[in-house]
Image (cartoon, rainbow, N blue to C red):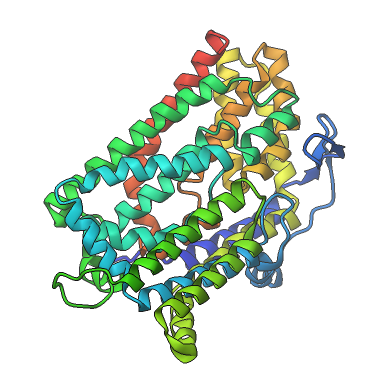
Amino acid sequence: MTKFKFPSAFTILFALIAIMAALTWVMPVGQYDRVHNELIDRDVPVPGSFKSIESNPQGVEDILLAPINGFYDIDSYAAAAIDVALFVLIIGGFLGVVNKTRAIDVGIKGIMVTLQGREKWMIPILMLLFATGGTVYGMAEESLAFYAILLPVIIRAGYDSLTAVAIIMLGCAMGTLGSTINPFATVIASNAAGVPFTDGILLRVAILGIGWMICVVYVMRYAEKVKNDPSCSLVAYMKEDNEKHFIASGDDNEEVLSGRQKLILLVFGLSFVIMIWGVSVAGWWMARMSALFIVAAIVVGLIDRLGEEKFIESFLEGARDLLGVALIIGVARGIVVIMDAGHLSDTILHFAEGAVSGLSAVGFINVMYWLEVVMSFFVPSSSGLAVLSMPIMAPLADFVGVSRDLVVTAFQSANGLVNMINPTFAVVMGGLAIGRVRYDIWLRFTWPLLLMLTILIMGMLSLGVLFNL
């Protein structure tokens, strides 16, 4: 009997494209009228304006073109996939050049010696940093740059690649779930809902703090179990292969960082500090971040005196390692392309609008949360979903005596939770591809955590209604 093998990320995404295309043939579709919202500088749907329109069924040609169009589709609320894919390739090239110098490998060995017996404390510290990025500016695509750095560190510490992926992905997603001042989720959603973004901030801080602790304990327990017994790892079958892939070759003799390698590590760390500053303060996006890492790669090459030929070879080899990740990003966006062309997004929103009528206050906010969960699968962009759903869903809260800021909290909590596992979210599929973690394994790892976080969120939203938090 042939043992079932879970399909690859590419197969899953192509299947979802085909399913979305099939829905365009059977679902009656419609569209809302739009008006321009000056506060968020976006066209938003008008409540009560939904009307049926002629369907636009997506055929075989549309399905085949969707992954290609996914690269070029200019989403009104997020970077084009081609920009993100190019950024990933350049990050790969930069890491290829740095790895050629062996500065990271030697530096990691030194860190492991320093942290002997205390490696587990890396987990809460790193998850706090990633959660901070999530809650402050919605760290997502930028997190892809950190996988290749963290994976060898975590594997050297005696954990597995799944632990490294969880630290980054759950850390960022928890920060977005508990957004406080995130302009791409909380601020846009609040403006679209017609309330100050500071309304409801204490409840969001509570969700963020408690949720972060739950995530940290969950990841630390798994990591400790793996360290004590590597066979407990959900990716144990990849252990030797991952060690060869993520840890640079070389003997295990004690090595000391040379002056040149120390300078390279300084440039390496400074590059990421500049990237975070550029995104959060100077308004940088993919083009400038990509240019930053091209410059950083050249500087590293000059410091190590690689020469033109070795530099180009190392850069291309590093980019080649992340080519699959870059392709996945475009294919994932292809799902959204099919949905938009088939007018599915507004139709799903209209169904959600009708689902909350006639409910009690507590029932309303919890059903609202689940509706946003469903819509987050189809619209993974936090700012995109905020612009689409808040102008319709937030005014409905007035009829049941629920504060509109609670609808904003329900939206961002749902979106953050779904984007921990959402196959239509390129950051999830890209991160798993870099970490070499199968999607089914990621689901198996995260489902108990998702259940705990869902109970937390629904409980906090209910308390928010009952005590007007």
Image quadrant for the N terminus?
Answer: bottom left
Along the line of sight, the residue nearer the viewer: 330 or 59: 330
Tag count in the figure?
0
Q: Kindly identify the residue that appears in the image at 53 percent across and 20 percent down.
A: 202
Can you give x and y, in whole percent of width and height, for residue 173 in the image? 47, 43
Query: Is 467 placed left or right of 51 in the picture?
Result: left
Q: Kindly identify the residue that appears in the image at 56 percent across and 64 percent down.
A: 329
Image quadrant for the C terminus?
Answer: top right
Query: Is 410 placed left or right of 116 in the picture?
Result: right
Q: Establish if 50 lies above or below 65.
A: above
Can you give x and y, in whole percent of width and height, for residue 287 in the image? 65, 64
Can you give x and y, in whole percent of width and height, for residue 165 in the image? 37, 54
Q: Establish if 100 lies above or below 423.
A: below
Can you give x and y, in whole percent of width and height, for residue 231 in the image? 15, 57
User: In the rendered image, is residue 177 in sight?
Assistant: yes
Along the line of sight, the residue nearer the viewer: 219 or 424: 219
Q: Establish if 436 lies above or below 165.
A: below
Query: Is 306 placed left or right of 348 in the picture?
Result: left
